[in-house]
Image: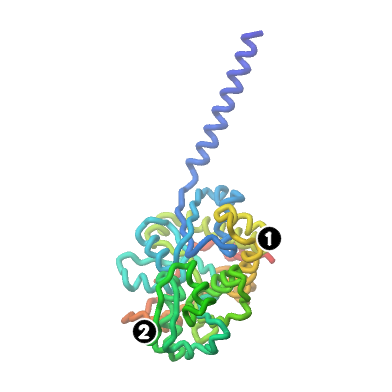
Amino acid sequence: MIRHILHRFAAVAAGVVLALSAVSGATAQQKNVRFVLDWAFQGHQAPFTIPVDDGTFAKLGLNITVDRGIGSGDTVAKVASGAYDIGLADVYSMVRFNAANPTKKLIGVMMVHDKSGLSAASMKSSGLNAPKDLNGKRMASPVGDASRQLFPLFAEVNGIDQSSIVWSNVSPELREPMLVRGEVDAVAGHVTTVLSNIRAMGADPANVLVMPYADYGVPLYGHVLCVSPEYAEKNPEIVRNFIRGVVHGFNVMLKDPDAAIASIKKRDPLINDEIEKGRIKLSNDVMFITPNVLENGMSNVDMTRLSETLVRVAQPFEMRTPAKADDVYTPKYLPPREELKIKR
């Protein structure tokens, strides 16, 4: 009897060891990927956290670390330095970085936002009704914010004398309070961030005049997944599967905003659910879902449009030669287009 019990115990123990070995083996096969956002953990960042939480990335063989960012300019520098493998950043901030760092150039592998949400914003009570009214005014923005970095293009197209602007270099949490209190006349920031933060302060976003760059003569693309070309070439399936996970995360966010909020709340328990739901809706309306995306799916980049915008940013970025579209974005790491369709 005792011998039988010992035999059964040994068999169970062996099974446990085998199971643990299998789990350990599966974990070992997962590829570690360090990913950094462009900004804080907010509702519209859920496409990058949902596939971590629901196991989609793991099923795709990826062990993803998602960290918050402090601005697109900072994100591209971190990816170029090797501190992170993949980053989310404004595509033109990446272009500007590439021009200044030709030996550390990055490339976009997925156009996450089909339309830019970069903007300038003022309180309607200030009497600033058009971009040209910003001449000689006080503005605030973090230095690394993409709206700040792309402001020269917006200024050049809309007759704003950049030298007349008095800039306050502020931390992200001070920008909107300074605007509401009248300490500055306007701010540069992403439309979803500015309006959502003002609402979170208890102020009415309807009292804010937002001037999206894309609606004022600059048909910009938005944020892109950026990597070093060397990393992408060595790890094409990692990049492709990461994109698959992001598309899945976006479709979940689109169908179930509550699940998106729950995922983000794991990273920042202090977020306000209703504020972030509003941010998700605004992001979908402004950046994610365009006629192009509805018809063709995510990251269907018009290389002619991209090229034209690269020509336009060359002068304000003080680039002797405009960047070539093929050097800025490549579709070679995308999954099949059918997998990039959104599911409404």
Q: Name the spot of residue 205 as percent of width and height, x first.
A: 61, 76
Residue 256: numbered disc: 1
Apparent side of residue 15 relative to residue 70 in the rendered image (left or right): right
Q: Name the spot of residue 297 as percent of width and height, x first.
A: 60, 69
Q: Which residue is under mark 2?
A: 315
Type of the residue with mark 2:
Gln
Vertical comparison of 278 with 239: above or below: below
- Quadrant position of residue 148: bottom left
Q: Residue at x 49, y 83 (%)?
A: 218
Q: Nearer the viewer, residue 288 or 276?
A: 276
Q: Residue at x 32, y 72 (%)?
A: 100
Q: Which part of the image, by quadrant, shows the C terminus? A: bottom right
Q: Nearer the viewer, residue 11 or 132?
A: 132
Q: Circle 2: is it few (<14), some (14-19), or many (20+) Cα within 10 Å? A: some
Q: Nearer the viewer, residue 161 or 287?
A: 161
Q: Nearer the viewer, residue 178 or 294?
A: 178
Q: Name the spot of residue 155 as percent of width and height, x first.
A: 43, 86
State which tag comes first along the sequence, 2 or 1: 1
Q: Residue at x 64, y 13 (%)?
A: 5
Type of the residue with mark 1:
Asp
